[in-house]
Amino acid sequence: MFKIVKARDYDDMSRKAANIISAQVILKPDCVLGLATGSTPIGAYHQLIEWYKKGDVDFSQVSTYNLDEYRGLTHDDPQSYHFFMRDNFFDHINIDLANTHVPDGSNPDADAACSEYDKMVAEAGYPDLQLLGIGNNGHIGFNEPDDHFSKGTHCVD
């Protein structure tokens, strides 16, 4: 299903995105969320944290799969998306960190890491809800503009 939701500004967009995500979690407590990194979703994550702290949403049964990670960074590197997600969301809610998944950029075998991640996502049944960002250069979900669309997890320059 595709629906365009208009927002007045960034804060309004963040609240509306958080509302959609929290509704998914409330309706299906063991849902699979596809999450994004970057500056765009931070407002939604902060809104979800606020609602969690007020007792309005429970993430204890949720599992997540992130879209992207930088190659060559350890999970605790401040520039990694593993770190980003913990710092901006996971460490502030009651999600089981074992149920949070980010591609493994530290694996020197990128093809194997991509294949393993695709298998994990497929075994999870794919996200019930996917949060995406659109970058200034037109990328959607970190899929950089190219002359073709790559299927599955892959490396981009």
Image (tube, grey):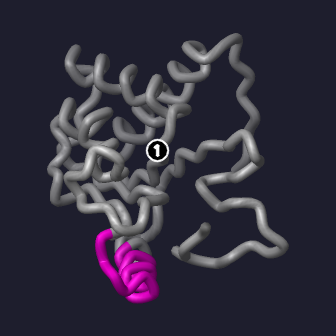
Can you say whether 62 is above or below 17 in the image? below
Determine if the magenta segment contains residue 117.
Answer: yes
Q: Which residue is the site of mark 1?
A: 37
Q: Quadrant of residue 119?
A: bottom left
Which residue sits at x=43%, y=61%? 70
Which residue sits at x=21%, y=49%? 61
Left or right? Give the position of 132 relative to 19.
right
Left or right? Give the position of 15 relative to 89.
right
Q: Position of residue 124 (x, y in %)?
A: 36, 70
Q: Position of residue 11 (x, y in %)?
A: 55, 14
Quadrant the C terminus occupies: bottom right
> Which is nearer the eye, 26 or 154?
154
Left or right? Give the position of 94 relative to 32.
left
Which residue sits at x=42%, y=60%? 69
> Which is nearer the eye, 33 or 70?
70
Question: What is the three-letter code of the residue carrying label 1?
Answer: Thr
> Which is nearer the eye, 61 or 12?
12
Can you say whether 11 is above or below 116 in the image? above
Q: Position of residue 111 (x, y in %)?
A: 45, 87
Which residue sits at x=76%, y=48%? 138
Determine if the magenta segment contains residue 48.
Answer: no
Can you say whether 59 is above or below 45 in the image? below
| Magenta stretch bounds | 106-120
